[in-house]
Amino acid sequence: MKILVTGGTGYIGSHTVVELQQEGFEVIIIDNLSNSQAEIADQIARITGIKPVLEIIDLTDKEKTSAFFKKHNDLSGIIHFAAYKAVGESVEQPLKYYTNNLCSLLNVLEGMKENGIENFVFSSSCTVYGQPDVLPVSENAPVKPAESPYGNTKQVSEEILTDTVNVSKLKAIALRYFNPIGAHESAEIGELPQGVPNNLVPYITQTAKGIRDYLRVWGNDYDTPDGTAIRDYIHVVDLAKAHVVAVKRMIEDKMKSNFEVFNLGTGTGYSVLDVIRAFEKTAGIKLNYRIMDRRPGDIVKVWADPAFSNKELGWKAEQGLEEMMASAWKWEQAYREKFKD
Ligand code: UD1
């Protein structure tokens, strides 16, 4: 069975391609390489022995997207990762985010409709919950007004899917990710941040490697046990595996409604200082960090209630924080040799 993975050379996409191939799916990737590299297809092949087909297409190009779907009208499903994801940049350049994230989604959905392709997995985010009133946060928690254009593109995308499944044969699953970190155990693929990372874990590993002087911890006066903000960090390979489960659920006709939403988290919240300590322990390195003011727009604490995903998908995140940090550190040490800037 053939699965299209858009954004398949990106961080989560590449890990998902590996898991799909290892489960026997044939994978085609579409990526415009705006935040990744074509060599990732070779790296994937080093793990699985199969180099996925990579089509370099910008999905905001309606004609090229439509031509792709005409050529590949035998797809069993689509996993749509292709999107911009930097929260701060989305505030500075909202139109760039709305155009890219929404036009690409619309063009893919049109292509599916024209060619009778029905199964669609969407890459959503726990950002749709904002600061939840109740923790842990379940799928039934209200969607809060988005804090950024990036977050809004996820909310609007889910609404587009809701409206479309009502009037067509489309079946969709939105997976709301908590904080994906870590890398494949082979250290052949992982996150490739461009420039100075915004996210915590790449910043930690780059600091440990000596690329950054020190980590800035954004605030230690929150209402949490140690004062630093709390997130539900999930190993990217656990996250990738959930996509395979979701695709199979659609293909095997096991969905309970034509649009389903699942949280992908571990159910455990860790503070920034917890993450630093776990890194120090697994890497055997003392990390240089300084406490700074709060980062504007940060949520204080959020972690998932994964009960519904665990039960309905028969999926559970398996790897703990130390395994996540160990794989992130192994990748940090390996990747600069593989991908020279
Ligand atoms: C953010 C977005 C999320 C998006 C994700 C991907 C929000 C509320 N969430 O997650 O929707 O999917 O980015 O890019 O905007 N931290 C530091 N120092 C650093 C970096 C981070 O202390 O140098 C802290 C942050 O304050 C936060 C935690 O580490 O408490 C995690 O931050 P980060 O990795 O940036 O992810 P989120 O902000 O949770």
Image (tube, rainbow, N blue to C red):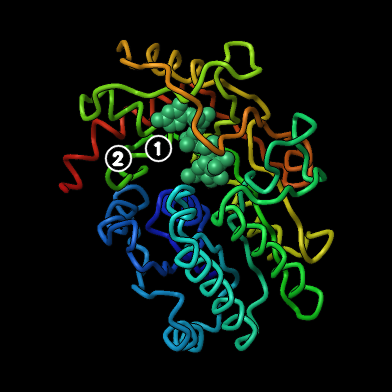
Residue 152 image offset from top left, x and y in percent: 62, 57
Residue 304 image offset from top left, x and y in percent: 69, 34
Badge 2 local density, few (<14 within 10 Å), some, or many (20+)?
few
Image vertical order of residue 318 relative to residue 308, above or below: above
Q: Which mark is residue 196?
A: 2
Q: Is residue 236 visible?
A: yes
Q: From the image, which quarter does the N terminus lie in?
A: bottom right
Image vertical order of residue 198 relative to residue 111, above or below: above
Between residues 206 and 75, which one lies in front from this camera angle?
Answer: 206
Figure quadrant of residue 167: bottom right
Residue 23 image offset from top left, x and y in percent: 52, 53
Between residues 178 and 114, which one lies in front from this camera angle?
Answer: 178
Q: Residue at x 49, y 48 (%)?
A: 87
Image vertical order of residue 5 relative to residue 242, above or below: below
Are circles 2 and 1 on residues that touch, CB within 8 Å? no
Badge 1 local density, few (<14 within 10 Å), some, or many (20+)?
many
Q: Amino acid at mark 2?
A: Val
Q: Residue at x 66, y 69 (%)?
A: 119
Q: Is residue 254 left or right of residue 187?
A: right
Q: Is residue 324 visible?
A: no
Q: Amino acid at mark 1?
A: Ala
Between residues 88 and 309, which one lies in front from this camera angle?
Answer: 88
Q: Residue at x 82, y 45 (%)?
A: 140
Sequence-first disc among 2 and 1: 1
Determine the secondary structure under disc 2: loop
- Ligand 1 closer than 8 Å to the CB at disc 2? no
Determine the secondary structure under disc 1: loop
Q: Which mark is residue 269?
A: none
C-alpha separation, residue under disc 2 versus residue under disc 1: 19 Å
Frontmost of labels 2 and 1 is 2
Q: Which mark is residue 183?
A: 1
